[in-house]
Image (tube, helix red, strand yellow):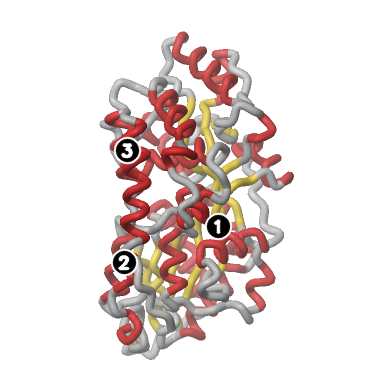
Amino acid sequence: MKKITKGFLSVSLGASLLLAGCGGGGDNADGKVTLELFSNKSESIDTYKGLIAKFEEQNPDIDIKLEAPPEAETVLKTRLTKDDLPDIMSIGGNATYGELARAGVFHDFTDSELVGKIQPSYVEMLEKLVGSEEEGVFGLPYATNANHVIYNKQKVEELGIEIPTNWDEFVAALDKAKEAGETPIYFTLQEAWTAMSVWNGVAGNLAPDDFATKKNAGEASFANEYDEVADKMLTLLEYGHKDNFGIGYGDGNSAFATGNGVFYIQGNWAIPEILKANPDIQLGTFALPSNDQAEENDLVSGVDVALAVSETTEHKEEALKFVEFMISEETAKTYIDEQKAFSAVEGVFQEDPVFEGIKVNFEEGRLTSFPDHYYPAGMGTENLVQDFLIKKNKEAALKTLDSEWEKVMNR
C-alpha cells in the first residue's frame, strides 16, 4: 500500500488502514452480515433504498445499511483518517476518487469479469484520475452524467426560440427571453457547488483538455487559459434573476419547475428533482454552446457514480456480490431510469425523451470531461468561483485559482 504525501491523505494511513475491518458493517446477532453502503448523492437515496430491498430479498443473509450524509466527501475523508472505511462506496469520479485510489484503500477490480461489462471510455476516465502512479481498476464506473442546459419547452416554444448551437445563438436566445420579461437563466448560487455546473459547461469547450497536466508542469495557468471562460461566465450572470446568490439548489429546482426561468444550467441529476415539484412540466436539454464554433461544442460528461469496495472490509465476498448485483443490466436500467442518468454498463441506454437534444452527443461520441474533475482535491474551487461571480474581479480570481492550485500541490 502506498502512503501519499500530498493533500488530505498525507496523514499516516499506511498503518491504520491495514487494520482490517475497522469500519463499515459487521455481523448481526442472527448471523446476518451487515454491509455499509456509503453514497455521496442525496438525490439517489430513494433509488438505493429500492435496490437494497431487492438485493436483500435475493440475499436474506446480507443486510445493507445506506449512509448518504451531507458534505459526503468531507465525511469520507474524515472517516478514512479514523480507520472507519465503509464496505462499499458509491462516489463521484473526481479528484477525490483519484487520491483515494492512489492511497491503496480500494479493492482492485483488474481481474474481475465485471470490468468487461463497463464501457471502456469511462474506465479510462477513472484511470486518468488515478494517474500512472498506481495501476489498476479501483472503481467500476456505474452511472454517468451530463452537464447541460435544461429548458422549459413551453416557454421556448412560446418565445419562438430555436435551440442554440454556438455562443452567439445562445446569447441571442437569452436576449429574446429577457426582452419578453422572462428570467433567461435561473441561478442557485447561494450554494457554491452549483456555480460549477456553469463553470464546467463553459470551460468544457474552451479550456485545453490537457490543462491539468500542463498546469502541474508549470506550462499553463488559469490566468492565460481561462480568460475567455471567466468573461463568458460574467456574461451569463447578467441574464439571471434579482437574487442570484440568495436562492439554493432545492428552492431553485422548485422555482424552475413552477415556471421561473427559461433556461437552467445544471446536470441530469436536477431533472428528477424538478419533476418531483411539477410532474407536468415539459423539459428539454442541450449542450451548453460556449464555443463560437458549433462543431466545437461537445457535451460535458463524466462518471457520476463509481462503485468501490474497501480493501480492508471483513466481508469482501458479500460486498462484491452487491456490486455484481448493481452491475446487472436490470439493476443498472432501474437506476438510470429513476435518476434520469446515463449508464456506464454496456448495453444499458437512457431512452427518456427529455434527453433527445443530447442523444446525438452520446451516439457520435461528442463528449468532453468535467474540467474540475482534474483539479486538485481540497482546492475549494466551487468557493473560489462563487467568490469570483460575486466580486466580478476576473484578474484577481484567476490569479487566486492559480495560487490555490499551487498551494495544494505543494503541501
Query: Circle 2 sits on which residue?
Result: 8
Q: Nearer the viewer, residue 87 or 130?
A: 130
Left or right side of 276 for 110:
right
Label 1, label 3: how far apart the Cα atoms are? 27 Å
Tell me the number on the disc at residue 143: 1
One can see residue 251 in this view: no
Query: Could you say whether the residue bearing mark 3 is in a helix, strand or loop?
Result: helix
Figure quadrant of residue 286: top right
Q: Nearer the viewer, residue 277 or 370?
A: 370
Mark 3 surroundings within 10 Å by alpha-carbon count, few (fewer than 14), some (14 through 19), many (20 or more): many
Q: Amino acid type of disc 1?
A: Ala
Percent position (x, y) of residue 200? 48, 42
Percent position (x, y) of residue 199? 44, 39
Left or right side of 291 for 278:
left
The structure residue drawn at horizontal position 33% and vertical position 32%, both measured from the top left corner, is 389
Q: Vertically, is 394 above or below 13?
A: above
Q: Quadrant of the C terminus?
A: bottom left
Q: Residue furthest right?
A: 364
**Of label 1 and label 3, which has the lower sequence position?**
1
One can see residue 320 in this view: yes
Mark 2 surroundings within 10 Å by alpha-carbon count, few (fewer than 14), some (14 through 19), many (20 or more): some
Percent position (x, y) of residue 169? 59, 20
Badge nearest the viewer, 1 or 3: 3
Query: Circle 3 sits on which residue?
Result: 386
Query: Could you say whether the residue bearing mark 1 is in a helix, strand or loop?
Result: strand
Q: Amino acid type of disc 2?
A: Phe
Q: Amino acid type of disc 3?
A: Gln
The structure residue drawn at horizontal position 38% and vertical position 31%, both measured from the top left corner, is 187
Percent position (x, y) of residue 90? 45, 65
Tell me the number on the disc at residue 218: none
